[in-house]
Structure formats: structure tokens, C-alpha cells
Amino acid sequence: MSDALEPDDLFAMPGIRRSAPKNEFPVPEMFPQVAYELVHDELMLDGVSRMNLATFCTTWVDDQARRLMNESLDKNIVDKDEYPQTAEIEERCVHMVADLWNCPDPQHTLGTSTTGSSEAAMLGGLAAKFRWRKQGGTGIPNFVCGPVQVCWEKFARYFDVEIRQVPLRGDRLTMHPDDLADRVDANTMMVVPTFGQTFTGLFEDVAGIATALDDIQARTGLDIPIHVDAASGGFLAPFCAPEVVWDFRLPRVKSINASGHKTGLAPLGAGWAIWREAADLPEDLIFNVDYLGGSMATFNLNFSRPGSQTITQYYDFIRLGRTGYRRVQEQIYAVSQHLAAGLRELGFFEMIHDGDPRRGITAVSWKLTDTDAGFNLYDLSDRLRTRGWLIAAYPLPADREEQVIMRAVLRHGFSIDIIDMLLTDMERSIAALQKNPMAKPLTKEDAGGFTHSAKAAVPTPGSTVGAAVSGGRK
């Protein structure tokens, strides 16, 4: 009997005896279980997504959602002829979201699913640019905003639009209605309030901004529309703060974007763009195409993409309904407020946003009150990583770069018990840092961080943040 048996243990099989291919396309093939194990084991070095309080994105879904994702991951959502029911489900979701945001005629307005709120934001921006041109606008249009997620800086650069960001002053951490008069002109194609700011979690005053634009129109004749970036707040306020007016109840609001994969509870890869009326989406942006055996209208930046996220979003809508979403989101706010209360008790921090549903999203942001505490927030963030917690520490935007804050985003899947463990680890981390202070405190460059910000490889020529001719944030 031959002794030359092939090993049946996974870690003795061919392919796993050498490093995984990295820089060149590999020549030999390998067994699928070996390839899986190589990739699986490398991913163990990633952080645990459930313990990531820096991300806004969904990190917990139920078993039924996972089954629907698996069952529909091979469906191309743009092929409406081959997958007509997926197209029907997308259309239902558009009407449901339009209804949720108080659209005047939710059954007949236009909207679309997207891969996320960034694509949806860019569609809203493109619609505003095309409307401005159709109304006689010439030259380079601009839009006014406060501190924004980097997708808006990308939009300005990629689509040749000037971004006019309002800098932070004193205790102002958002764009205010009285910031607009000196920044809008005949080339202003829209104002973009952020309903759930990425830096602090705070809501900007959409109703106040609409009133300010009404006053500007009465004085100057400029009729400037609003696009609301509700990436995070769009699926929170309707359930937990319905008295806050921010949506299509304001006639000046022409379009809204939101992430389904943030507070909409859908898996990663879901977003929504909705227009107040069909006329607010210029026909120049709509393509009727023949594709894979059918004819369809499309106004997405992406074309082929999976339908599974939209299908799962529809599952969330019909499973939870308004009642279920309210119960889930109210509990996340309760967890946020529990964290804020615990941080106050530690005695080192001042709250910027404490999880109040009338002021912002399900997040908590804070700053250090004592500069002689024996540690800074970068030190604390780094120390918490030793226990697996990922919590962002970063400076505020212009003109408050000297102020470093921390922000924790609470999402579906967080419980009071998890937050109690976090607070215990935070207390231990502070005690360890005070007992053994860093010889050289960490800086932003040392600590890294996740801030939804980015620096352009090639700076915008002559940009001056906050001025009437401002470019990007950095």
C-alpha cells in the first residue's frame, strides 16, 4: 500500500503552504477551501464592525435580511425586463420614502435607489445644476453649505461647481440661516443643509434656512432651491421628531438624499434620491435605454448593480412599518443618551451632541474640558482600540481646526449593556493614561481616524474656505 497519501487537513493542503498572492496575477489555481481560508484569515485583522462607533453604516441585520441578500445578489436591478418584480419593489420603495418625507404627490413624483447617499447627493446636485442652466444660468454655478461630508467636495470638483462652505465660528458648529445673505448670488444653484452632520451629528436648521431664502427672494428676486442632505437624519426624524420640519413640507425643498444603509437599517449599498415633483428632475438627466432585452428609464451614476440591497430595504419597510421603525429608532436614541450620561459622569467631557432626537442623529459627540487631564482625545481613542472599540477623534473643520472632538455613532444592534462595557473600558483607559501618561501625546497623524473627510491630491487653485469664492474644505 502506498504511503504517498495527499494530506486531507486544510492547513497541509497545497496552496496554503505559501503566502497568498499579492502583487501579481497568480498562475496556479488552488482548492476553493484553501482560497477561502486565506482570505478569511487575513480579514481577522480588520476591526469588528459591531464595535465600530465611527461608522454610520449598518453593521447588524437579521437572518431573514441575510437570506434575501443571498437569494437576490445575482439580480441586476437595472435589467427591468428580466427582473420585473425587483423593479416593482424599487418603485414601491420610492413611493414609500416620498410619503415618509411628506412629498405633495408621493405616487407620481420621481426618485431612485442608489448605491448610497453619496450617489444620491450627486444626483440631487446634478438636477439642481441642470435646472439652473435651463433657467438661464451661465458660467460656473455654486452652492452654499456648512461642514459637509466629502462627497460634496467631490461633486464640486467632478462636475465643475463651486462649493461655498460656511466656516465654523465661536460656538456655531453648523450653517445658520443668517450665513446665507453674503454667500448667495445669481449663480447659486442650491443651498445644501445637512440633516445630520457627519462631524458632530447635529441637524442644521432647514426650516430657518428656507425662511432666510424666502427673505432673500423678497429683497433680490433670487429664487434659490434647497437640496437636503439627509444621509443620516432622513430615517430618524420622521419617526422620533416628527415636529421638526425639514422635508417636503417646505416648498423650497426640491430634493432629498438619504442612506438606506445608515439609519434606514438596510445592508451596505442602499441609498435614495427623491424629488419634490417630477418637474424638479430635468428630463435631460433621464435616459431611456434598451438593455438586456428591455427598455428602461435610468438616471443613476452607476448602471449594473445588485438589486439585493433594495429588496432588503423593502423587507425592512414592510416588516417594521412606521410603528416598528419608531420603536427601533427610539431605542437607539435611548442608548445614545445613556452613553452621553455616562460620559458626563466621568467628569472629563463636555457634550456637543447628547443624542437629543430634536437636535441630531443617534450619535454622541464631545470635547475634553481639561487640557491638563493627562491625556488627549487621540490618546484615548488609541487606548480604546486595545479593547476593540473604534471611536473617531478628529479636529473640527475651518475655522475651528484647533478643537479636537470625539464622536460615537450608535446604530441598530447597540444595547445598554454594550454601552456599559464601553464606559467601563473608557474609565479604565483614562485611569491607565493618567497613571502612565504618554511621553509625547498623539496627534491626528499618529492616531489616524475616520472622519468622512479627505484631502484632494491636487488642491483647488486659489481656494479660500468660507469666502464668497471658496473652494473645498482643505
Image (spheres, grey):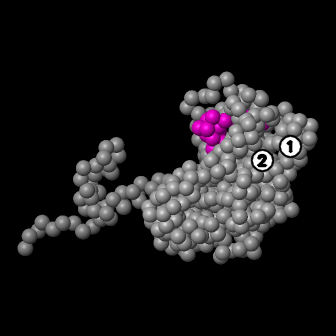
Q: Quadrant of the C terminus?
A: top right
The image quarter in which residue 184 lies: top right
Task: From the viewer's perspective, tell me whether residue 55 is left or right of residue 330.
Answer: left
Residue 157: give x, y in percent of width and height: 61, 35
Q: Can residue 353 be seen in this view?
A: no
Residue ID at (69%, 30%): 139
Q: Is residue 20 visible?
A: yes
Report how many numbered discs are placed on residues in the image: 2
Relative depth, front residue between 224 and 200: 224
Residue ID at (65%, 45%): 126
Q: Which residue lies furthest to the left in this view?
A: 1
Q: Is residue 240 magenta?
A: no
Q: Is residue 391 positioned above or below 328 on the image?
A: above
Residue type highlighted by circle 1: Leu
Task: From the viewer's perspective, tell me whether residue 151 is left or right of residue 296.
Answer: right
| SS under mark 2 | strand
Residue ID at (63%, 34%): 160
| SS under mark 1 | helix
Residue 10: give x, y in percent of width and height: 29, 65
Residue 269: give x, y in percent of width and height: 56, 58
Q: Does the magenta stretch include residue 150?
A: yes
User: What range of the chain is rendered magenta?
Assistant: 149-166
Give the residue pinned by disc 2. Answer: 226
Q: Are marks 1 and 2 in contact (CB under 8 Å)?
A: yes
Q: Is residue 62 positioned above or below 238 on the image?
A: below
Give the residue pinned by disc 1. Answer: 213
Residue 410: give x, y in percent of width and height: 69, 59
Task: From the viewer's perspective, tell me whether residue 252 is left or right of residue 452.
Answer: right
- Give the numbered dot on residue 402: none
